[in-house]
Amino acid sequence: MHEASSEKAGFLDNYTLFLMAVASAKVSKSFHEIAAAQGLSVAEWRVLACLHDLGTATVSELSRLSLLEQSRLTHLIGRIQTRGLVRRYRDSKNRRSVQVKLTPEGAELAANLVHQAKEHERRAVIERLGKADTERLHRLLRKLMEKPA
């Protein structure tokens, strides 16, 4: 890929969605290795991070936030439940709704990984872009996430 934009650059050199995906993959790689060392896939880490923020969530909420299809998520929750990281239960108000919550062990692991993720972000993003550009990038990404295309 070329560094600068130009008419002669290839399609991917200036295709925003490709650049976002590659940047995310490259910057995330070393943190994903940290999660893997804890026996977690990227998808499992996303679920733990969501529950770290939410406390308790429905499978539907987790599916939306973790970007995982609901049937795949249900299987994944079963795996991390077997590890003792989460527990599932029926919502007392809506028996069709399944709630998911971190166990104390899951909460400790999630908190530890969130701390490591923040440190990784500091080194991999904030130190490279600077605080102002990082905040600008966050604003731009949130703007892209506001409305579906």
Image: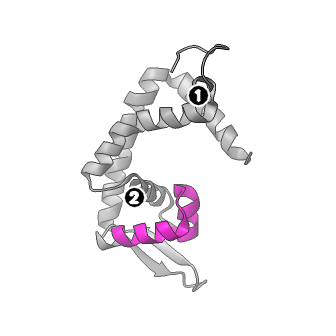
* Relative horizontal placement of residue 133, taking residue 36 as reference (left or right): right
> CB under 8 Å between callouts 1 and 2?
no
Q: Which mark is residue 129?
A: none
Task: Name the residue rendered at 29%, 50% in the picture.
Answer: 36
Residue nearest the observer in this picture, 3 or 129: 3
Task: Name the residue rendered at 27%, 56% in the picture.
Answer: 39
Q: Where is residue 14 shown, x and y percent of the image?
A: 62, 24
Asked whether residue 10 is in view, the answer is yes
Q: Give the range drawn in magenta.
A: 57-79
Q: Name the residue under label 1.
A: 12
* Relative horizontal placement of residue 84, taking residue 87 as reference (left or right): left
Amino acid type at image mark 1: Leu
Q: How crowded is mark 1: few (under 14 residues within 10 Å), some or many (20 or more)?
A: few
* Element under disc 2: helix
Q: Name the residue under label 2.
A: 44
Q: Where is residue 5 shown, x and y percent of the image?
A: 62, 15
Rounded to the nearest angstrom, the CA distance separating label 1 from label 2 is 30 Å
Front position among marks 1 and 2: 1
